[in-house]
Amino acid sequence: DPLPDSVKSVLEEGISLYKLHTSRHGRLESSKGTYAKDWAKWEKQLRDILLSNTEYLNSIQVPFDFAVKLVLEQLRSIAKGDYTAPSTETRKFGSIVFAAVSLPIEQIHDLLKMLSGKNAMVEAFLKDKDMESSLRKAHITLAHKRSHGVTAVANYGHFVNRQVPIDVTALLYNPNMAAFEARLGTVDGEAVTSKNEWPHITLWTGEGVAPKEANNLPQLLSQGKAARVEIDPPVTISGPLEFY
């Protein structure tokens, strides 16, 4: 029998959360870092859902003797050369969390240094932030499974590993976060578009501020709660489109 939807859904959420956590914090414990509250909430949800599906979970457990027999049969098949590895193609998109253009971090740091050298306010903003160690990866999220759905993410498939030129047009920042405003270019004459209303490269967020909060910078700017430094002419940086 297939997994109940609730079990499947909570497991997928856990995988998504794990990928988000590791991409930002590496091997840091789940109880620490930006997603600590999300982890706690997910673990409780997982326990509740598994508990409510106890009957189903008990029904699908395979007797040990049968499992041993099955493994032995598979080993015999492998020894004979009859074994074909199962295809992962059909499950490929299920494990993908988001599509993004990855950008060379050195060029991002160079651009920040250039801006800092030209603009006293940017220099003052960056002064107490160790960007070299805190900003080790840079990307522009194009579509996220949680926000836009699996299909929206999968639609970028034909662009995967292709170099996408990005025009960096401005720096937006406030005391809690900073991001580069970005304009996506084309691949073979086809425009690469983002599902996010405001394509950007998150550069820094303060303690306890989730990276996704950077999406609010244009709105905060319109409310006078953020600053914008234009980059004119825009600086073009290219990077591959990848699935995460």
Image (cartoon, grey):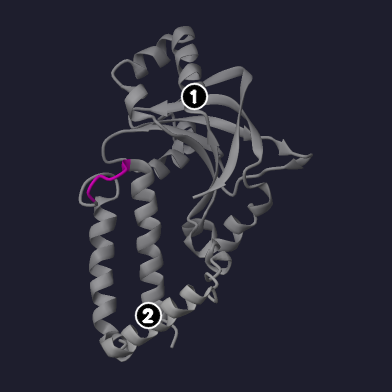
| x then y, percent, for residue 114 | 49, 12
Callout 1 crowding tier (Cα within 10 Å): few <14, some 14–19, many ≥20? many
Number of disc labels: 2
Residue range corresponding to the magenta coloring = 25-29
Task: Look at 29% across and 56% down and name the residue there.
Answer: 38
The verdict on residue 217 being magenta is: no
Task: Look at 49% across and 50% down and name the residue there.
Answer: 244
User: What residue is pinned by disc 1?
Assistant: 108
- Residue 63 appears in the picture as rendered: no
- The amino acid pointed to by label 1 is Ile
Relative to residue 38, is residue 238 depicted above or below? Answer: above
Callout 2 crowding tier (Cα within 10 Å): few <14, some 14–19, many ≥20? few
Relative to residue 118, is residue 37 depicted above or below? Answer: below
Tell us which disc is closer to us: 2 or 1. Answer: 2
User: What residue is pinned by disc 2?
Assistant: 71
Task: Look at 41% across and 71% down and name the residue there.
Answer: 9
In this rendering, would 90 be left or right of 162? left
Task: Look at 33% across and 26% down and name the residue there.
Answer: 133
- Quadrant (top left/top right/bottom left/bottom right) for the N terminus: bottom left
| x then y, percent, for residue 77 | 48, 79
Q: Secondary structure at mark 2?
A: helix
